[in-house]
Image: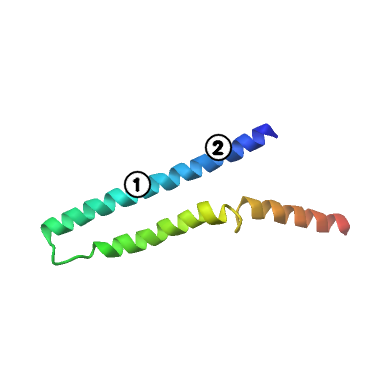
């Protein structure tokens, strides 16, 4: 039981680490893009498209990690479905 909790916690930490790595990459690259565009061609501010669409991806990742927490087609859902199916088969 302790080992199972440890593995779940370790998996959660890995997911958080990946998210924060993606978030830092998003911020750094967008800041660099803004600087490059403002220095080289301030009349063409196309960087916001990258910021918006990549930002949507970051928000989806964050919602999966912090709001849904595996409830929608995640580990919790899988375990619930497995138990449900096993219960149905047991009653047959």
Q: From mark 1 to mark 2, how far is it between C-alphas?
A: 21 Å
Q: Position of residue 91 (x, y in %)?
A: 87, 58
Left or right side of 15 for 31: left
Dot 1: element: helix
The residue depicted at 54 percent of the width and 43 percent of the height is 12
Residue under label 1, please give it: 24
Residue 53 position in % (x across, y down): 35, 63
Find residue 90 and report its horizontal and vertical position in percent. 85, 54
Q: State the residue lying farthest toward the left.
A: 40
Which residue is tagged 2? 10
Check contact, mark 1 vs mark 2: CB within 8 A: no
Name the quarter where the N terminus is drawn: top right
Quadrant containing the C terminus is bottom right
Could you say which quadrant of the image residue 34 lies in? bottom left
Image location of residue 86, percent across then percent down:
79, 53
**Dot placed on the residue nearer the N-terminal end, 1 or 2:** 2
């Amino acid at each position: 039981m302790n080992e199972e909790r440890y593995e779940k916690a370790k998996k959660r930490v890995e997911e958080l680490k990946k998210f924060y790595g993606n978030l830092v990459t998003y911020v750094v690259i967008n800041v660099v893009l803004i600087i490059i565009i403002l220095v080289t061609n301030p009349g063409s501010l196309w960087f916001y498209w990258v910021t918006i669409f990549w930002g949507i991806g970051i928000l989806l990742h964050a919602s999966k990690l912090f709001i849904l927490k595996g409830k929608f087609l995640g580990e919790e859902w899988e375990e619930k479905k497995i138990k449900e199916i096993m219960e149905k088969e047991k009653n047959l």
